[in-house]
Image: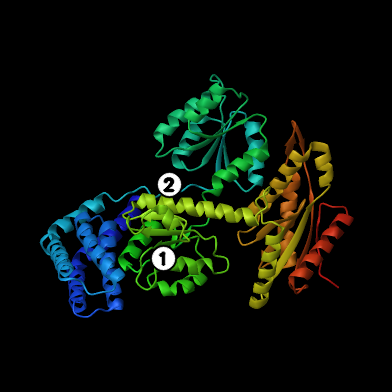
Amino acid sequence: MNTRDHKQFQERVRFLLDSFVQDLPVRIDEIEQQWRQLQTKWDSKAMQALHSLVHNLVSNSMTFGFPALSTEARALEQIFKRLLQEEMLPSPALADDVGKQVTALKKISVENLPELESQIATAIDTTENVLFSPIHDSNLIFVVEDDAEAAQELALQLRYYGYEVEVFNHLEKFRAALMQRPNAITLMDIEFPGDAMGGIHFMKNMQKELPYSARVIFISVHDDMSYRLGAVRAGSVAFFTKPINSNELIDQLDLITASQVQEPFRVLLVNDSTIELTYHAAILEQADMIVRSVSEPLKLVEALNDFDPDLILMDLYMPECNGTELSRVIRQMDGLISIPIVYLASENDFNTQPEAMSLQGDDFLVKPIAPSFLVSAITSRVTRARALRSLMIHDGLTGLLNHTAIKEELAREVVRSSRLKTSLSFAMVDIDYFKKVNDTYGHAAGDRVLKSLARLLKQRLRETDIVGRYGGEEFAVIMNDTDAASAAKVVDEIRNVFSRLLHLSHDEEFSVNFSCGIADLAHFSDAVSLCEAADQALYQAKQRGRNKVIINVGD
């Protein structure tokens, strides 16, 4: 979080705290008035509303760090909870206890108001500034290598995969560039003239000058412990030995950059306390999450249909229905049985945490919760849920959509394009002579070729294009708002780049081609006919000599 963002966050928190403290006398007066009405005539609904008012006071005071207030309000809440369970008017002694607790609350809200306001300044000044990691350039690579020819060859391979590359043969020029762009990923040779560990020594000193640790991948002809240990101490995120396997290097770069460009987490907050909703939303939004808030639990279904959250953070106690009841509703809705539900509750809302977990929830966070811990807990849960969901719909080797998922996507996109009257093309891609690759170089090399093409398709196509592994060495591409001629031009450029990539097997380099068949919605009106037409065009490309792109326009 930069200084400006942190100040904005502090201002939002200050506003909420000011509002809470200033509204406190009014809230306590409301509690007292409702209590007076209930002393003469029992009303379960009114008692439920009163209990909810006090519960929110307890929760808010804990969240904002007012322990004396939360202690007194908690004692009052326990009395009201007992009355709700017994469904009867209070005894004179119990009524007297309620009066004492209300008086204690009024004393805090009036006599201790200056003290509460002074706590706001302390709370604001100590607001955590730990919600962000630096924003990285997603595809900038610095290649640092004194062998100019080797550096340019490596840069060429990286550029084929869509990375922006700058080459440095001299350390001082690299120093100046890294000081300007410390977010770049550095790919550095360890050996330099006159110093067998020159790259390590240089980066170790550079790390001290930078605002935060640079990400560096070291390359060396040596593979002993002293080099690897030195690389780690200089801040390495990976280590490769020469000759470099370009597929494994690209895999590592993709892994590093993938975490930087993932879709923001989508979190649905459910809480009848508007002030807590706003506070938690502010924290999560500062952590670059997309937040939707629901203050009326009975409107949850509507929000779920509109928002499609990664996780639901739900207050356990709400007046119209409690969190566990809402969770049961969610679990009975199509597609939501596995969505993470995290309860947010006070420490004694449940006797044990396992009891909470048995009621349709996945986690249990106790108020008050530190901003950094809230972000960390949600990040952990969403990351795990996304990973599990990804395993269900993605191919294990290439990471692309699997056969079933890509066919489902095609059916959906055909319906959408037909409704909007927009163009759509479907391409079938097949690696030429793939069996020969496996027979000659081995299945491990064949797998690397498949991953290489998958990566190239993802990097060269638009984010709106949908790519899947159709089966074996076949891939499928759905290109929205694109006619067949335009799709063929794009795929042919990828075919040309792929044919120039060098693959490595046992120190032997080889290249591979692919063929492609394309059909579009202008000539074929449904998903089934599109698939068949693209497959026929692919067959024609194979028959005409391979390594080419053919369009099927029908009869």
Q: Residue, x 77% and y 42% (percent of image)?
A: 511
Could you say whether the residue bearing mark 2 is in a helix, strand or loop? loop
Question: Marks 1 and 2: which is nearer the front?
Answer: 1
Specify few, some or many for label 1: CA neighbours under 10 Å numbering under 14, 14-19, or 20 or more.
many
| CA–CA distance in space, label 1 to label 2 | 33 Å
Q: Quadrant of residue 21?
A: bottom left
Name the residue type under label 1.
Answer: Gly
The residue labelled by disc 1 is 323
The residue singled out by tag 2 in the image is 133
Q: In this view, does 519 lie to the left or right of 116?
A: right
Residue 414 percent across, percent down from the top left: 69, 71
**In the foreground, 379 or 513:** 379
Measuring from the top left, give residue 434's x and y in whole percent.
Answer: 81, 46
Q: Nearer the viewer, residue 416 or 85?
A: 85
Sooner in the amino-acid sequence: mark 1 or mark 2: 2
Q: Which element is circle 1 on?
A: helix
**Outermost residue, top direction?**
194
Residue visible at 83% across and 45% down? 435
